[in-house]
Image (cartoon, grey):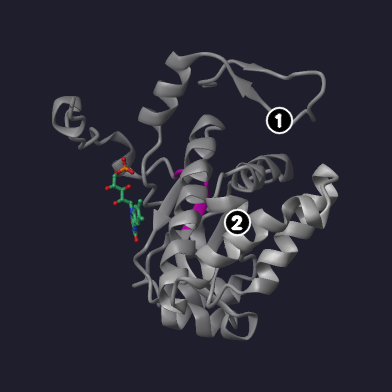
């Protein structure tokens, strides 16, 4: 069943979709759930994976710094090891794809300079144009300890995770956001220390197994009256 009505604007690649129908968006959000059992025989197409990756790329972040990396873990042996470090949760090995969100152990002026250079090349600005912006970002970044920078970067990574989860739902891709893993062991298995990275959250992506009974459970959600406070 296709949940979505999609228009493909001429100026965008075929895989790129704009959704027009709010009802369909809401339906997709009710359809999604944190998948417990994936169908091991169903794999995401390259087009679908590219659309999911693009949702992460397009996620907003503080200053636009995008202080995170996403590891697309494809090696089955590594995924077995990661499963052991995630309390045996089967999504780690059974989902079509596994994305590990990682943040830098530190963010330095070099990272800010790289971002400013990117901005200059994309927008044709000069170093002079962006000098004030650059020193403002550096001031903000350097006012934090490494731990505070990691926590700040993790917040940005979780926004990207949110974009990924919603996009997955709109594309009828099943997903499980997961924090139930030992980050220290993940970093070890994935060699993240050498890359100056720390894992923060992961997302398994693929298609639900017909046997996953969690798919049929009603949503447990706070009522709008409880969740939203009118001031
Ligand atoms: C940050 C985060 C971490 C989570 N960690 C896990 C996890 O380790 N394993 C798991 O099966 N579900 C995990 N979940 C799924 C939640 O339990 C689930 O989203 C929540 O109970 C609401 O249910 P629903 O997503 O099915 O609507 C996590 C969700 C989030 C957002």
Image spot of residue 53 (x, y percent):
65, 48
Would you place residue 60 above or below residue 101 in this image?
above
Q: In this orientation, does residue 188 appear?
A: yes
Disc 1 residue: CB within 8 Å of ligand 1 = no
- In this rendering, is residue 21 above or below 183? above
Asked whether mark 2 lies closer than 8 Å to ligand 1, one says no
Residue that appears at 70% across and 73% down: 110
Q: Does label 2 or label 1 sit earlier along the sequence? A: 1
Answer with left or right where residue 30 lies relative to residue 231: right
Mark 1 lies on residue = 16
What's the residue at 62%, 43% (across, down)? 52
Callout 2 touching callout 1 (CB < 8 Å): no
Q: Residue at x 64, y 71 (%)?
A: 75
Q: Secondary structure at mark 2?
A: loop
Q: Is residue 150 above or below residue 171?
A: below
Judge the density around disc 2: few (<14), some (14-19), many (≥20) Cα neighbours within 10 Å: some
Q: How far across and how far down the image is residue 210, in percent?
A: 41, 40
How many neighbours does mark 1 have within 10 angstroms: few (below 14), some (14-19), or many (20 or more)? some
Compare residues 61 and 47 and report the one nearer the observer.
61
Residue 102, percent from left and from top: 53, 67
Between 219 and 66, the one lying in front of the other is: 66
Looking at the image, which residue is at 54% across and 21% down? Answer: 2
Taking the view exactly as shown, the residue that stands out farthest to the left is 226
| Towards the viewer: 17 or 123 | 123
User: SS at mark 1?
Assistant: loop
Q: Position of residue 219 (x, y in %)?
A: 24, 34
* Quarter where residue 194 is shown: bottom right
- Distance CA(mark 2)–CA(mark 1): 21 Å
Name the disc covering residue 66, or none.
Answer: 2
Numbered range of the magenta stretch = 203-208
Query: What quarter of the picture does the C terminus occupy?
Result: top left
């Amino acid at each position: 069943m296709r949940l979505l009505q999609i228009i493909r604007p001429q100026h965008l690649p075929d895989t790129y979709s704009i959704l027009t129908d709010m009802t369909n968006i809401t339906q997709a959000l009710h359809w999604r759930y944190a998948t417990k059992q994936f169908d091991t025989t169903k794999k995401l197409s390259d087009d679908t994976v590219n659309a999911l990756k693009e949702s992460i790329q397009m996620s907003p972040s503080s200053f636009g710094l995008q202080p995170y990396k996403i590891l697309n873990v494809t090696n089955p042996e590594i995924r077995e090891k990661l499963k052991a470090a995630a309390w045996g949760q089967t999504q780690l090995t059974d989902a079509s794809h596994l994305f590990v969100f990682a943040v830098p152990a530190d963010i330095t002026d070099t990272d800010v300079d790289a971002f400013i250079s990117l901005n200059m090349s994309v927008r044709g600005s000069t170093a002079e144009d962006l000098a004030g912006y650059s020193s403002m970002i550096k001031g903000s970044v350097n006012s934090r300890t490494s731990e505070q920078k990691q926590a700040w970067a993790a917040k940005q990574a979780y926004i990207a995770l949110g974009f990924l989860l919603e996009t997955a739902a709109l594309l009828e891709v099943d997903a499980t956001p997961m924090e139930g893993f030992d980050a220290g062991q993940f970093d070890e298995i994935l060699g993240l220390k050498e890359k100056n990275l720390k894992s923060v959250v992961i997302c398994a992506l693929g298609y639900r197994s017909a046997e996953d009974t969690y798919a049929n459970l009603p949503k447990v959600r706070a009522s709008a009256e409880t969740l939203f406070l009118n001031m």
